[in-house]
Image (tube, rainbow, N blue to C red):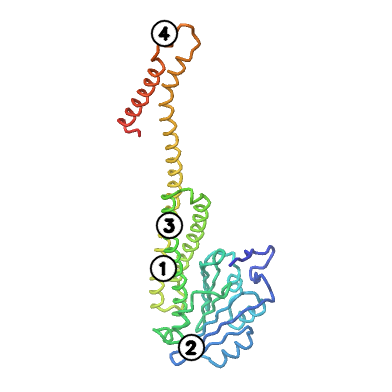
Amino acid sequence: MSRKKRTKKLFQSPITLNLEKDDGQVFIDCIVYSDKGYKRLTDQHWDQTKDFLSLHPHQTTWLNLYPLENKQTLEQIEEYLGINPFMMADAVDFSLRSKYWFTEKHLFCSFKMKKPNFDGSEHISFILSEGVLLSLQEVKEDVFDHIRIRIENNYGLIRKKGADYLFFLLCDALIDQYTLISDESEEELLKLEESINEDYKEVGLHNLHDAKKELLQTHKDVRAAGDVLEGITASEFFLLSDLVKKLFNSISHNAKYSIDSFSRQLEHTKNLSDLHFAQQNNKLNEMIKLLTIMSAIFIPITFIAGLYGMNFRYIPELQFNWGYPAVLGLMLLVVVFILYLFKRKRWL
């Protein structure tokens, strides 16, 4: 899946929504739940969603928006939830790196989520308020389906806890995605190494460059995600319970594991480049070795042939009846001696 990179427009107010389209679509996936029940509505119109929310007050609400292409809908949601305009502007600005900050009523954080078949990283943001979690994504596909299943089937503690616990589960799913990507990329590097060892010509330097470029970007994203998690854990936002802060501390350790893994893989790509060049040098050395042996063999017999090929009138050996076979025999002895010498010196 490819996408056009969205850039910040010049001379634009910092609270202006930086959208690719102002009148496009926004799908709203709304889930409300409590320990007694669960309801879900997927719609494109905020008015219907707002009426749905009014029928289920005092329940934990999860609003998931994708893609972010309708300015009016986003502004209406911003007004309904009382969100700081700067938060919504940061949520739709895909050029920003991962960050977090909070006000008296809302906590904002954003991540770069790696996904297969997606060009680059998806920018995903969360805005947490009392009883409501708003998540904003570039595209529909995500890694949260297992959480939706847990809510629907009332697995675990999710319906018994508030929006802060749901917030933790979503962040945990993102960090788990980095762990999976780390394991997959490590396997790919091992395959590259095996290919280089078998035949370095099968792996071009552009393959190693592409792998290193991808790892650098992913390493940058997961480091930023780790900083966000540490900031959330240390924050004093009133909605985060002690349990949720401890849970965030645990996934912060998982993020550090991914950071270390990607750091090792970056070092591995450097070693693979060295291995690639070493294989090239070994091949070149083998060629030079072969040429050297051939030169060492032909230099003395060329000297003998040149000696008796001189156009002097009186060369005694030229008159011998057995002179020609004797010279050939001498040349053969020289070749055998050189090969024996090279073998004894272990140069062959």
Say which of marks 4 and 2 sits in front.
4
Going 58% across and 85% down the picture, which residue do you hit? 42
At a point 46% along the width and 73% down the height, the residue shown is: 171
Q: Nearer the viewer, residue 183 or 10?
A: 183
Q: What amino acid type is highlighted by mark number 3?
A: Lys
Q: Secondary structure at mark 2?
A: strand
Viewed as shown, does residue 234 lie left or right of 56?
left
Q: Which tag is nearer the camera, tag 3 or tag 1?
A: 3
Query: In which quadrant is the C terminus drawn?
Result: top left
Q: Earlier in the sequence, mark 3 or mark 1?
A: 3
Q: Are marks 2 and 3 in contact (CB under 8 Å)?
A: no
Q: Which mark is residue 8?
A: none
Amino acid type for the residue under numbered disc 1: Ser
Looking at the image, is mark 4 or mark 1 earlier in the sequence? 1
Amino acid found under the numbered disc labelled 2: Tyr
Residue type beneath disc 4: Pro
| Front position in the image: 112 or 329 | 329
Q: Residues within 10 Å of mark 4 (few under 14, many from 20)?
A: few
Q: Nearer the viewer, residue 331 or 117?
A: 331
Q: CA distance from mark 2 to mark 3?
A: 46 Å
Q: Which residue is mark 1?
A: 252
Residue at 42% of width from left, 64% of height from top?
183
Q: What label sits on residue 33 in the rendered view?
A: 2
Q: Which residue is mark 4?
A: 316
Q: Please rate how many residues cluster around mark 3, counting C-alpha atoms within 10 Å: few if below 14, some from 14 to 19, many from 20.
A: few
First in residue order: circle 3 vs circle 4: 3
